[in-house]
Image (cartoon, rainbow, N blue to C red):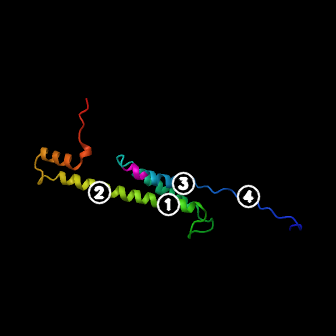
């Protein structure tokens, strides 16, 4: 009950915690260029996906077993999950492509001796050449 001329004051709300959602987004985004570093982006994207799912799960209202999560961290968590899934998809396609090329070079019918197989590997994977540094 309020007196005339006075307003009721509501207690300040606690700030929403977005740590998991933000970490998911950062790992999903950082994982994409990290794929070029020998696939380091794949574990980062897996961790980002797990953190995003946990952030979505924790963001649900307490009494709701199903339904949409509440709060402002939902958008960040969804973006983190999507970025992580895109990174995982690109990394998986790249691994399958590289392995299929490696299998082609290992075909003993097309490349019967070690020298021709080595030439195929050098031609297909120019970044994998041995360096003879002094």
Measure how far apart labels 3 and 1 are at the Cα level.
9 Å
Measure how far apart labels 2 and 3 are at the Cα level.
30 Å
Q: Residue furthest top?
A: 134
Measure how far apart labels 4 and 1 are at the Cα level.
28 Å
The image quarter containing residue 84 is bottom left
Residue 50 located left or right of residue 59: left
Q: Which residues are magenta?
A: 31-35
> Which residue shows up at 60% across the image and 69% down it?
64
Q: Earlier in the sequence, mark 4 or mark 1?
A: 4
Q: Nearer the viewer, mark 4 or mark 2?
A: 4
* Residue at image mark 3: 22
Q: Earlier in the sequence, mark 2 or mark 3?
A: 3
User: Element type at marker 4?
Assistant: loop
Q: Is the residue 40 above or below the residue 3 in the image?
A: above
> Which residue shows up at 27% across the image and 53% down it?
98
Mark drawn on residue 105: none
Q: Position of residue 125 (x, y in %)?
A: 24, 48
Count the numbered circles shown: 4
Q: Do residues under tags 1 and 2 come within 8 Å of each other at their CB atoms?
A: no
What is the chief secondary structure element of the magenta stretch?
helix
């Amino acid at each position: 009950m309020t007196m005339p001329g006075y307003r009721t004051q509501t207690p300040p709300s606690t700030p929403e915690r977005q740590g998991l959602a933000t970490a998911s987004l950062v790992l999903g985004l950082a994982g994409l260029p990290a794929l070029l570093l020998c696939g380091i982006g794949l574990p980062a994207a897996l961790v980002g996906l797990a953190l995003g799912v946990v952030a979505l799960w924790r963001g649900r209202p307490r009494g709701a077993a199903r339904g949409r999560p509440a709060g402002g961290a939902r958008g960040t968590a969804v973006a983190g999950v999507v970025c992580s899934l895109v990174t995982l998809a690109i990394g998986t396609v790249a691994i399958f492509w590289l392995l299929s090329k490696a299998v082609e070079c290992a075909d003993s019918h097309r490349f019967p001796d070690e020298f021709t197989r080595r030439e195929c590997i050098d031609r297909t994977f120019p970044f994998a050449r041995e360096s003879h540094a002094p």
